[in-house]
Image (cartoon, grey):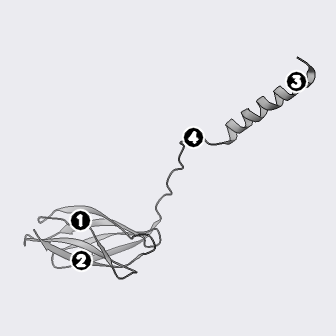
């Protein structure tokens, strides 16, 4: 092999090695960003209470809903949306029962307020 061919071959190997180091692996995914949950909230009604945090510029609400009465009514949280709609949490059923909740606003909207509601259970 001539010196020129060795130089070209060496440059090609160096370029491929550099590309392998700098480019992410195929199929590698970036970790999702962590939630930013900064503001506390708390609401109550005759059927129970709920509390938690506002997250991600009011696009997500996390917390817990608690049933405080044996009255056949199971409380849940309703999130009012900026587009006039709403999203509902799961409900807590039976006196003394609690349930972790997460409400998500659909893309392009945000949650503007929270209220307690109940279902017969």
Q: Position of residue 75 (x, y in %)?
A: 18, 71
In space, the residues marked 4 and 3 are separated at their CA atoms by 31 Å
Tell me which label, 4 or 3, sits earlier in the chain. 3
Q: Residue furthest top?
A: 1
Q: Nearer the viewer, mark 2 or mark 1?
A: 1
Residue at mark 3 to residue at mark 2: CA–CA distance:
77 Å
Disc number placed over residue 90 in the picture, else none: 1
Q: Which residue is mark 4?
A: 26
In space, the residues marked 2 and 4 are separated at their CA atoms by: 47 Å
Mark 4 or 3: in front is: 3
User: Disc 2 versus disc 1: distance between alpha carbons?
Assistant: 12 Å
Q: Are marks 2 and 4 in contact (CB under 8 Å)?
A: no
Does residue 58 appear left or right of residue 23 in this picture?
left
Q: Nearer the viewer, residue 23 or 37?
A: 23
**Residue labelled with disc 3:** 5
Residue 47 left/right relative to 32: left
Determine which residue is flagged by label 2: 116
What is the spatial separation of the Cα atoms under label 3 and label 1, in whole angstroms? 70 Å
Q: Position of residue 109 (x, y in %)?
A: 43, 75
Residue at 24% from the left image edge and 77% from the top image edge = 116
Quadrant showing the N terminus: top right
Confirm or deny contact between disc 3 and disc 1 (CB under 8 A).
Answer: no
User: Can you tell which of label 3 and label 2 is closer to the viewer?
Assistant: 3
Q: Quadrant of the C terminus?
A: bottom left
Vertical comparison of 108 with 31: above or below: below
Callout 3 touching callout 2 (CB < 8 Å) = no
What residue appears at the point 68 percent right and 37 percent down from the top-left corner? 21
Element type at mark 4 = loop
How crowded is the residue under tag 2: few (<14 C-alpha within 10 Å), some, or many (20+)? many
Mark toward the start of the polypeptide (3 vs 1): 3
């Amino acid at each position: 092999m001539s010196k020129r061919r060795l130089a070209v071959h060496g440059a090609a190997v160096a370029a491929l090695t550099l590309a392998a180091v700098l480019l992410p692996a195929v199929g590698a995914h970036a970790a999702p960003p962590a939630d930013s949950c900064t503001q506390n909230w708390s609401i109550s009604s005759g059927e129970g209470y709920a509390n938690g945090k506002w997250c991600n510029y009011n696009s997500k609400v996390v917390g817990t809903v608690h049933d405080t009465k044996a009255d056949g009514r199971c409380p849940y949280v309703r999130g009012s949306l900026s587009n006039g709609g709403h999203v509902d949490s799961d409900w807590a059923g039976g006196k003394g029962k609690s349930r972790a909740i997460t409400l998500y606003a659909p893309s392009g909207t945000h949650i503007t307020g929270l209220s307690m509601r109940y279902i017969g259970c």
